[in-house]
Image (cartoon, rainbow, N blue to C red):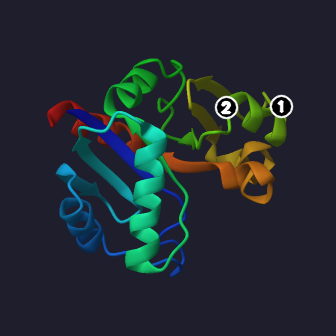
Amino acid sequence: MRRYVTLLRGINVGGKNQVSMKELKELFEENGFRDVVTYINSGNILFSSDHLDIEFLKKHCEALISEKFNLEISLMILPAEELIKSLNNAPDWWDVDKESKHNAIFVIPPATADEICKEVGEPKPEYEKVAGCGQVIFWSAPLKTFSRTRWSRIVGTPAYNKATIRNANTAKRLAELCRKL
Protein backbone atom coordinates (compact mmCIF):
# COMPACT_ATOMS: atom_id res chain seq x y z
CA MET A 1 0.00 0.00 0.00
CA ARG A 2 1.39 3.38 -0.99
CA ARG A 3 0.26 6.89 -0.08
CA TYR A 4 -0.31 9.44 -2.87
CA VAL A 5 -1.11 13.11 -3.26
CA THR A 6 -3.30 14.14 -6.18
CA LEU A 7 -3.38 17.76 -7.30
CA LEU A 8 -6.21 18.67 -9.64
CA ARG A 9 -5.56 21.53 -12.00
CA GLY A 10 -7.98 24.43 -12.43
CA ILE A 11 -10.98 23.44 -10.33
CA ASN A 12 -13.12 25.76 -8.20
CA VAL A 13 -11.31 28.82 -9.54
CA GLY A 14 -13.36 31.89 -10.36
CA GLY A 15 -16.60 29.91 -10.37
CA LYS A 16 -15.36 27.54 -13.08
CA ASN A 17 -14.99 23.78 -13.01
CA GLN A 18 -16.95 23.39 -9.78
CA VAL A 19 -16.18 20.17 -7.92
CA SER A 20 -17.49 19.33 -4.46
CA MET A 21 -14.68 18.01 -2.28
CA LYS A 22 -17.20 15.84 -0.41
CA GLU A 23 -18.36 14.25 -3.66
CA LEU A 24 -14.77 13.91 -4.85
CA LYS A 25 -13.83 12.10 -1.63
CA GLU A 26 -16.84 9.79 -1.99
CA LEU A 27 -15.94 9.10 -5.64
CA PHE A 28 -12.42 8.03 -4.69
CA GLU A 29 -13.67 5.87 -1.81
CA GLU A 30 -16.33 4.20 -4.00
CA ASN A 31 -13.60 3.28 -6.47
CA GLY A 32 -11.33 1.44 -4.09
CA PHE A 33 -9.00 4.14 -2.83
CA ARG A 34 -8.38 4.05 0.91
CA ASP A 35 -7.67 6.62 3.60
CA VAL A 36 -9.04 9.38 1.34
CA VAL A 37 -8.61 12.93 2.62
CA THR A 38 -9.29 16.18 0.76
CA TYR A 39 -7.69 19.46 1.73
CA ILE A 40 -9.30 22.83 1.00
CA ASN A 41 -11.42 23.47 -2.03
CA SER A 42 -8.70 23.61 -4.68
CA GLY A 43 -8.49 19.92 -5.56
CA ASN A 44 -6.00 18.35 -3.18
CA ILE A 45 -6.63 14.68 -2.45
CA LEU A 46 -4.57 12.24 -0.43
CA PHE A 47 -5.23 8.52 -0.70
CA SER A 48 -3.69 5.08 -0.33
CA SER A 49 -3.64 2.48 -3.09
CA ASP A 50 -2.06 -0.87 -3.91
CA HIS A 51 -1.42 0.39 -7.46
CA LEU A 52 2.19 1.46 -7.97
CA ASP A 53 1.83 2.65 -11.57
CA ILE A 54 1.34 6.41 -11.34
CA GLU A 55 0.37 6.76 -15.01
CA PHE A 56 -2.39 4.17 -14.52
CA LEU A 57 -3.62 6.00 -11.39
CA LYS A 58 -3.55 9.34 -13.21
CA LYS A 59 -5.61 8.09 -16.15
CA HIS A 60 -8.00 6.26 -13.85
CA CYS A 61 -8.59 9.36 -11.68
CA GLU A 62 -9.01 11.60 -14.73
CA ALA A 63 -11.60 9.17 -16.15
CA LEU A 64 -13.49 9.01 -12.83
CA ILE A 65 -13.61 12.81 -12.63
CA SER A 66 -14.65 13.13 -16.25
CA GLU A 67 -17.47 10.64 -15.81
CA LYS A 68 -18.73 11.99 -12.47
CA PHE A 69 -18.34 15.75 -12.98
CA ASN A 70 -18.29 15.96 -16.80
CA LEU A 71 -14.94 17.79 -16.64
CA GLU A 72 -11.70 17.14 -18.48
CA ILE A 73 -9.27 17.99 -15.70
CA SER A 74 -5.57 17.33 -15.81
CA LEU A 75 -3.97 16.31 -12.58
CA MET A 76 -0.71 15.32 -11.01
CA ILE A 77 -0.23 12.30 -8.78
CA LEU A 78 2.91 11.90 -6.78
CA PRO A 79 3.91 9.55 -4.01
CA ALA A 80 3.60 11.17 -0.59
CA GLU A 81 7.27 10.56 0.14
CA GLU A 82 8.21 12.44 -3.04
CA LEU A 83 6.24 15.51 -1.95
CA ILE A 84 7.87 15.38 1.48
CA LYS A 85 11.34 14.97 -0.07
CA SER A 86 10.82 17.91 -2.44
CA LEU A 87 9.64 20.20 0.36
CA ASN A 88 12.48 19.06 2.62
CA ASN A 89 14.84 20.15 -0.17
CA ALA A 90 13.16 23.50 -0.83
CA PRO A 91 15.64 26.38 -1.09
CA ASP A 92 16.49 28.24 2.12
CA TRP A 93 14.82 31.43 0.82
CA TRP A 94 11.47 29.81 0.03
CA ASP A 95 8.61 30.76 2.36
CA VAL A 96 10.82 32.86 4.62
CA ASP A 97 10.00 36.49 3.80
CA LYS A 98 6.45 37.32 4.92
CA GLU A 99 6.38 40.27 2.48
CA SER A 100 6.77 37.91 -0.47
CA LYS A 101 4.59 35.46 -2.36
CA HIS A 102 5.82 31.86 -2.27
CA ASN A 103 4.49 29.18 -4.64
CA ALA A 104 5.23 25.55 -5.38
CA ILE A 105 4.69 24.86 -9.06
CA PHE A 106 4.00 21.17 -9.57
CA VAL A 107 4.97 20.00 -13.06
CA ILE A 108 2.55 17.50 -14.57
CA PRO A 109 4.37 14.66 -16.38
CA PRO A 110 5.33 14.05 -19.06
CA ALA A 111 6.46 17.69 -18.84
CA THR A 112 9.63 18.30 -16.86
CA ALA A 113 10.74 21.13 -14.60
CA ASP A 114 13.52 21.98 -17.09
CA GLU A 115 10.99 22.23 -19.91
CA ILE A 116 8.76 24.54 -17.87
CA CYS A 117 11.73 26.73 -16.90
CA LYS A 118 12.75 27.08 -20.55
CA GLU A 119 9.20 27.96 -21.62
CA VAL A 120 8.68 30.58 -18.92
CA GLY A 121 12.20 31.98 -19.27
CA GLU A 122 14.97 33.05 -16.98
CA PRO A 123 13.81 34.56 -13.71
CA LYS A 124 14.53 38.23 -13.12
CA PRO A 125 16.94 37.97 -10.15
CA GLU A 126 16.20 41.50 -8.98
CA TYR A 127 12.53 40.58 -8.52
CA GLU A 128 12.22 36.82 -7.99
CA LYS A 129 13.91 33.55 -7.07
CA VAL A 130 13.28 30.21 -8.76
CA ALA A 131 14.70 26.76 -8.03
CA GLY A 132 13.57 23.23 -8.77
CA CYS A 133 13.59 19.91 -6.98
CA GLY A 134 12.24 16.96 -8.95
CA GLN A 135 8.79 17.81 -10.34
CA VAL A 136 8.44 20.88 -8.09
CA ILE A 137 9.59 24.41 -8.94
CA PHE A 138 9.88 26.78 -5.98
CA TRP A 139 9.22 30.45 -6.68
CA SER A 140 9.30 33.50 -4.42
CA ALA A 141 8.78 37.18 -5.21
CA PRO A 142 8.27 40.28 -3.06
CA LEU A 143 4.65 41.44 -3.14
CA LYS A 144 5.79 45.03 -3.88
CA THR A 145 7.42 44.05 -7.18
CA PHE A 146 5.35 40.96 -7.98
CA SER A 147 3.99 42.38 -11.24
CA ARG A 148 7.54 42.84 -12.58
CA THR A 149 8.46 39.19 -12.31
CA ARG A 150 8.70 36.87 -15.27
CA TRP A 151 7.19 33.93 -13.36
CA SER A 152 4.05 35.82 -12.37
CA ARG A 153 3.20 35.61 -16.06
CA ILE A 154 3.33 31.80 -16.22
CA VAL A 155 -0.47 31.91 -16.60
CA GLY A 156 -0.04 33.40 -20.07
CA THR A 157 2.40 30.76 -21.30
CA PRO A 158 1.96 27.25 -22.72
CA ALA A 159 3.82 26.03 -19.61
CA TYR A 160 0.82 26.89 -17.46
CA ASN A 161 -1.17 23.99 -18.96
CA LYS A 162 1.58 21.61 -17.83
CA ALA A 163 1.58 22.58 -14.18
CA THR A 164 -0.58 23.19 -11.15
CA ILE A 165 0.33 25.77 -8.54
CA ARG A 166 -0.09 25.72 -4.77
CA ASN A 167 0.99 28.40 -2.34
CA ALA A 168 3.60 27.53 0.27
CA ASN A 169 1.03 27.12 3.05
CA THR A 170 -0.97 24.58 1.06
CA ALA A 171 2.11 22.66 -0.09
CA LYS A 172 3.46 22.46 3.46
CA ARG A 173 0.10 21.43 4.87
CA LEU A 174 -0.18 18.62 2.29
CA ALA A 175 3.25 17.34 3.32
CA GLU A 176 2.16 17.54 6.96
CA LEU A 177 -0.96 15.50 6.19
CA CYS A 178 1.20 12.94 4.36
CA ARG A 179 3.36 12.52 7.43
CA LYS A 180 0.33 12.02 9.70
CA LEU A 181 -1.57 9.47 7.63
Q: CA distance from mark 2 to mark 1?
A: 13 Å
Is 122 positioned to the left or the right of 52 in the image? Answer: right
**Residue beneath label 2, please?**
113
Q: Which mark is residue 122?
A: 1
**Is residue 147 among what the camera can see?**
no
N-terminal of the two: label 2 or label 1? Answer: 2
The residue shown at (15%, 37%) is: 181
Q: What amino acid is found at the position of numbered circle 1 in the picture?
A: Glu
**Can you give x and y, in whole percent of width and height, for residue 86 in the image?**
45, 24
Between 75 and 142, the one nearer to me in the picture: 75
**Can you give x and y, in whole percent of width and height, for residue 91 in the image?**
54, 20
Q: What amino acid is found at the position of numbered circle 2 in the picture?
A: Ala
Is 147 positioned to the left or the right of 179 in the image? Answer: right
Q: Residue 82's quadrant in the figure?
A: top left
Element on which disc 2 rests? helix
Q: Are marks 2 and 1 in contact (CB under 8 Å)?
A: no
The residue shown at (32%, 75%) is: 20
**Is residue 32 among what the camera can see?**
yes
Q: Residues within 10 Å of mark 1 (few under 14, many from 20)?
A: few
**Can you give x and y, in whole percent of width and height, for residue 80 in the image?**
32, 32
Relative height, residue 174 to residue 2 (above, below): below
Between 123 and 12, the one nearer to me in the picture: 12
Q: Residues within 10 Å of mark 2 (few under 14, many from 20)?
A: many
Which of pointers 2 and 1 indicates the residue nearer the eye?
A: 2
Is 116 positioned to the left or the right of 134 in the image? Answer: right
**Can you give x and y, in whole percent of width and height, for residue 175 in the image?**
31, 35
Element on which disc 1 rests? loop
Between 37 and 148, the one nearer to me in the picture: 37
